[in-house]
Image (cartoon, grey):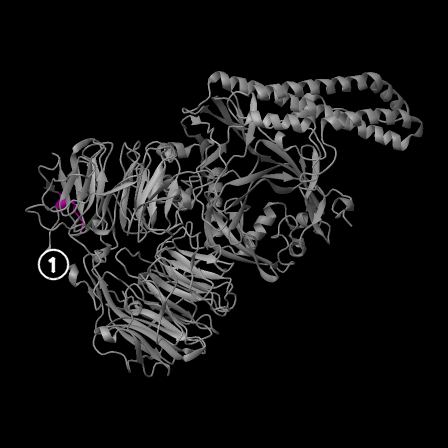
Amino acid sequence: MKKILFSLAVVLCASASYSQVSILKGLELFGDLKARHIGPALMSGRVTDIEGHPTDSKVIYIGTAGGGVWKSQDGGVLFNSIFDGGLQELPQSIGAVCIDPSDPDNTVWVGTGEVWTRNSVSIGAGIFRTSDGGKNWKNMGLEKTERISAVEVHPKDPKTVYVGAMGALWGDSEDRGVYKTTDGGATWTKVLYVNATTGCSEIVMDPTNPNILYAAFWEFRRTAYSFNSGGVNSSLYKSTDGGATWNKIHNGIPKGNLGRIAVTIAPSNPSILYAVIEAEKAEEKGLYRSDDAGATWKHLNSNFELTVRPFYFSRITVDPKNPDIVAKAGLSGSISHDGGKTFKGLGMMHSDIHDIWFDVNDPEKLFAATDGGLYRSLNGGTTMEMIQNLPICMFYHVSVDNQDPYNIYGGLQDNGSWYGPSESPGGIEARDWNSVGYGDGFRVYPHPTNPNIVYSEMQGAEGLWRYDKQIQQVKVIKPFPVQGDPKFRFNWNAAITTSLHAPDRLYIGSQFLHLSNDKGDNWLKISPDLTTNDLSKQQQESSGGLSADNSGAENHCTIFTIAESPLDANMIWVGTDDGNVQLTKDGGKTWTNLTLNVKGLPAKTWCYHIEASVHDINTAYAVFDGHTKNDMTTYVYKTTDAGKTWTSIVTSDIRGFARNLQEDRINSDLLFLGTEFGLFITIDGGKNWLKFTNGVPTVAVHYIEEHPVTNDIILGTHGRGIILIDDISPLRQLTPEVQAKKLHFFKTMPYEMDETSNFGGSSGETQFVGANPSTSAKIIYYLSSRHTFGKMSLDIYDENDKWITSLSPGKQKGINIVEWGFNSMAPTVATGKTIAGGAMFAPRVPAGKYKAVITKGTEKFETIIEVTYPNKSIFTKQERLQQQETVKTMYVMTEELAYMVYQIDEYLAHSEKVMKENSSLKKQALKFNTDLMALKKILVITTGDNYVGAADKELREKIGDLFSTIGSYYGAPSTTQLKSLTMLQTDFAAAKKRFKEIQIAQLAKYLAATEKAGFVSVTMKSFEEFVKKN
Amino acid sequence: MTKFFLFLAFSFTSILSFSQTAEEIVATYIKNIGGSDKLKSITSVQMKASVDYGGMSIPIDMVSLRDGRSVMKITFQGQEMVQMAYDGKTAWGTSFMTMKPEKNDAEETENIKRSVGDFISPLINYKENGYSIELLPNETMEGVECFKIKLTKKPLMIDGKEVPNIEFYYIDKENFVPIVVETEIPSGEMKGNISQTVYSDYQEVDGVYFPFSMMQRLKDGEGQTIEFEKVVINQKFEDKIFLFPGE
């Protein structure tokens, strides 16, 4: 017994501590707080790989650089995201997609980690497989490979799979090479490995003999300040025994160091291979062809498109039917129709082509993967059209303004700078977005008080612009060196920011902090070089390896983040890409380097973001990112003494290296953290973190903003565009006490009734349209357990306890949000032959306080919500009253008419039965029936249909039309409308009179006669019973 | 002390549940909602419900029979109209434009025929129907941890081709009833999107538990809820209520 009690105690303790922890960690925490994706998709984003079904070319998969995997089942017209993951961690950076040829309808492998290794490239986390066409995914291992270049599945034996692991970009790693499984991914064997700096960049399988494989190996390395492509270890290999042994196949291939190699096989003739080779000598670079399955190679072509930026463009594709038609990905893409001897450009599309795929059944139809989305051609690549529903754009940064609705500003990888609204009539469409910058876009800021002015930049601050939207004037405002200045070093993604204290102030960071007090016209340098100024990290001219690549992407020893304290304009924090944290408390006169105070942080770790607290002047958060040193650790520190000491607020809950932190304005314990693997939220100042999975995939979150008025969280993601979480204020109120209650209502601000109306948008179904926020009132509550058994209901009452309407309550464990569109119930409408569209209208309630009552079994829970008229309304109180009174009048008319028709219908049915069954009463019944029918015909439509066979409108339809016309506009009814109402009232009064006449003249006699003859009398509901709605 | 033992028993149940198979989970569900014998003895179910449509409460009357026949009627401005019906041969509904009955297309009808064994729940007779079930890793749905059961039914006919017909049942681990059922939309413009049906308000009707609230939505989207007011089992219905009236 003692033992039992002891174990019981253990169980209880475990349970108690579990519940304590779970309170702040539960997966249910966020409930109905859901992400809203607004794209946009007009510029789309980088697509890395295209794979088509081997026989059904309507089925196409694409892998993207940061937006997961998308599937089309209609030949590329519409795509759906199939790799979001929900609670499962599915990294959105995709290297290779491969359809299992023996089960192409269901089994697809996805190797994560992009292989087009630009500076901003994300990382993967191994290989995944679906066995149901993308509905469920299983992690199949190889988690440490970082990036996977190819997957090849044996056509007859689906358990045999080869994976090309390119491996780590930023450091040495042994997790690379060719991996093989023969048990469907349960175990993997590395069958070809070169060394820790050289990875497999491509594998192709002979379609006629799966034991023949070709593998390209690439020696490569990137740092924050350099890139190298090439070395003695880059090679091309062939295996003829299913990967057991491999031989180099370099006969005809240039000697010396090689760089990246693209290789492919002609599906219609597997003896023909093409390879694109990065070599030492310019004349030896380019396209090679083998007609003897790799035994010998012949150099064919060194055109620009074939040799340009091999690290970014190394994919070559052969037409499935014609071995001489070859398409090469490149800056613009090119195609040869003579076996590679000559090439012509592909049609106009976004530059930077990463993959090309030919339709297996109709190779004239081809797709191209670009930095700006997916393109389709129906004429062999001559003209290209963009797919317009892929919201996979790659934001580096976001900011917001204070307009209503507010706008979101941001810059994108290779797609310029833009701003667009957080809501728009009919949804947020392509046409709602406005271009405000060329090149690669990064940080974009609206002027804090002048809504017409926008600041934007392009890579390396080559452009820094002030754009006046109203007068359409762009001014270059980049600071130039003056006498005595060294060359300014700007990061690829140069830090700029506006000020909370001086509207015309603007900051930009080179190695110095520059300040302008006149919107960028003139600049002051307000710091010394704040970086380490390490000259060894400033040799970008020699970057690139075998192919020079000095694009500015490797600029280093620069300022990367600037944070002016919201509480003191003179207190400015600066973080640099080479690991410094600097602070001035006197507006730049003196600076203190705080870097060494950050204990536990490896030296020279990129300071990605500093968040100066809005709650306390000495509090700040610093986010460091070591991934460019091959350190994927999460680093987030907090100081409360102006940088003297720092404490890590990272827990094991967080996954991925971090880039950005956003502090909540109201609750200092509520923090939002963006990492390489999604969004993490803490409600207890960092003691516990929880990944937000309600619609935010495992996507790289580069920047987070909180809107000061709407309380929305705005995420700039690098692969899924802008993602919003509308109104996070419930999270501010979430405490262990709240979570312990059976049901807790969150306090809400008064809801303004939206009175805008419009005609919607213009996008077709093939275009992405971002969702609008809800404009309804919300009843928000926390349920400590899910309601599954017994009835649960939610009713709205007015202040006098008059029932208004019922809503469908949410029942999940966690936060539930129930929306109420401010409407009461629609009136009961008379039954006619057709539908009275105008009468389908539920009037809006007046402003005031309303009671929401949740009934859960025998328990009741109540809260009050307040609804108000819009501040900016054009209607007076008197006008509203007049409208509301008129609507009430017409509501009653509609229901009285409905009741009259109901009574008539009951009498008609009775009289028809009498006529049919009793010949002696037929005459009397017929008269009664005919008179009632004649009356009914003027009350409701009794013939026709709901479309072009419609009959003329009768009283029901006329009242209904006027009712909804007046009801849906919140100002006073017009004189014309009121005159029309008077006419309808007169007509209705006449109808009532006629009904009464018939009743007086015939009803009593009719009922007496029919009852006497044995007919059951008419049972009529009372008016109240007839119109009752709850 | 009784409380302690109850607690202990509950803990053991939780531990045992880790090793449960899909078959055992489905069997527990079937037992919990009334038992196989009871469920298999039901010949008809009539469900009266309402759905809110912009402030209008629209009454719905659904009848389904064990042999697969079914009819769903809605009442709109006092007019009854058949939204969907299947008479054993023809699937049909009412055109809102003409208010006249029209046949569904041949594939839709064929797919309804293929699902006639799904009466009350396709999990009840899944073996007899030739369906298969598979247990997938647990997932959290509606804030609670659920067993995830993959149900593979008879293939659907879509655009002339047979395609897999798969539903995912999320069965609440505590209560052993489905709280969410998920499926991929198989055709039309929404093809490829995931639709979810969320069940709650389970209540007993003559010894059988039915969900009295059912919300349909796109995954991560807003839903439309049908609230059931009354469920009646084993009533008799005239054949003519299901029959396509046009022929």
Amino acid type at mark 1: Ser
- Residue A908's spot in the image, x, y percent? 80, 28
- Residue A605's spot in the image, x, y percent? 19, 51
Quarter of the image where one finds residue A473: top left
Left of A12 or right of it: where is A936?
right
In the picture as drawn, the residue positioned furthest to the left comes out as A484
- Residue A1005's spot in the image, x, y percent? 87, 19
Left of B246 or right of it: where is B6?
left
* Chain of the residue under the numbered disc 1 shown in the image: A
In the image, is residue B242 above or below residue A780?
below
For mark 1, what is the residue?
A536
Asked whether the viewer can see residue A245, the reply is: yes
Q: Residue at x 87, y 26 (%)?
A: A925
- Residue B44's spot in the image, x, y percent? 71, 45
In the image, is residue A746 above or below residue A377?
above
In the image, is residue A710 above or below residue B63?
above
SS of the residue under disc 1: helix
In the image, is residue A287 above or below residue A681?
below
Main SS of residues in magenta? loop
Range drawn in magenta: A594-601
Q: Is residue B180 magenta?
A: no
Badge 1 density bin: few <14, some 14–19, many ≥20, Cα 10 Å: few
